[in-house]
Amino acid sequence: MTKGVVWLLATFLLTTVSSAEAQQPAKTPKIGWLSARRALNSGQEVIVRMLRDLGYVEGKNIAFEYRYADDKLDRFPALADELVRLKVDVLLTPGTPGALALKNATKTIPIVFADVTDPVAAGLVESLARPGGNITGFTSIEAVLAGKRLELLKEAVSNLSRVAVLWDPQSPSSAQEWKESQMAAQNLGLQLHSMA
């Protein structure tokens, strides 16, 4: 998935550089990064390293504008607006809350999300086949796999009857997984306990 994100970014950057060269050769493309938190060994570091491997070196021929919400999701809209005002060339975010904030902040700057469970249900894209608009990215489609996980767990533990499920009611993707888990549990004769 990270390689895919990097290739999408590289494509946007090549387009930006070509356009910039036709207008003004000194423009350095900027990537806006919006995340809930700064994390060690994060996807952000992997993306920066992979872009460097493709010849895009931060501070040399590419610039990043990083914004972190410090785990306060209500900060996302203001941070997204700030990145848009900086006129970045492409916006990148690792999850649903950041992607929603960026989508609400701009209809023109390309947005790439790195891991959204169900971008259609979240209202980010029209469909997986044809996202539409200025937003695209990668999905793990985890909610669809919730039932399969319970099925495998039941196969591994033959006398399984109750399962505790950790989920976050504030996260659209987590709420969707909980819903899918409930339907699958009913079919498998399992009793679920919410650990929200």
Image (cartoon, rainbow, N blue to C red):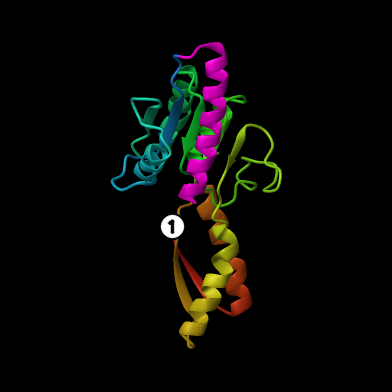
Report the residue at 53% width, 30% height from top.
14
Report the residue at 70% width, 46% height from top.
127
Q: Which residues are magenta?
A: 1-25
Residue 161 location in percent, x, y?
A: 49, 81
Residue 123 location in percent, x, y?
A: 63, 41
Of 83 and 29, which appears nearest the observer? 29
In the picture as drawn, the residue positioned furthest to the top comes out as 24
Of 101 and 168, which appears nearest the observer? 101
**Tally of numbered tags:** 1
Residue 16 location in percent, x, y?
A: 54, 24
- Please identify the quarter of the rendering in which residue 36 is found: top left
Left or right of 143? Residue 32 is left
**Residue 71 higher or lower than 151, as above or below:** above
- Please identify the quarter of the rendering in which residue 65 is found: top left
**Residue 107 higher or lower than 189, as above or below:** above
Q: Quadrant of the C terminus?
A: bottom left
Check if residue 23 falls in the magenta segment: yes
**Residue 105 higher or lower than 160, as above or below:** above
Secondary structure under tag 1 reads loop
Density class for disc 1 (Cα within 10 Å; few <14, some 14-19, many ≥20) is few
Chief secondary structure of the magenta span? Answer: helix
Badge 1 amino acid? Ala
Of 166 and 120, which appears nearest the observer? 120
In the picture as drawn, the residue positioned furthest to the bottom comes out as 159
Residue 184 location in percent, x, y?
A: 60, 71
**Residue 162 higher or lower than 50, as above or below:** below
Q: Which residue is disc 1 drawn over?
A: 196
Report the residue at 41% width, 27% height from top.
62
Check if residue 4 falls in the magenta segment: yes
- Please identify the quarter of the rendering in which residue 70 is found: top left
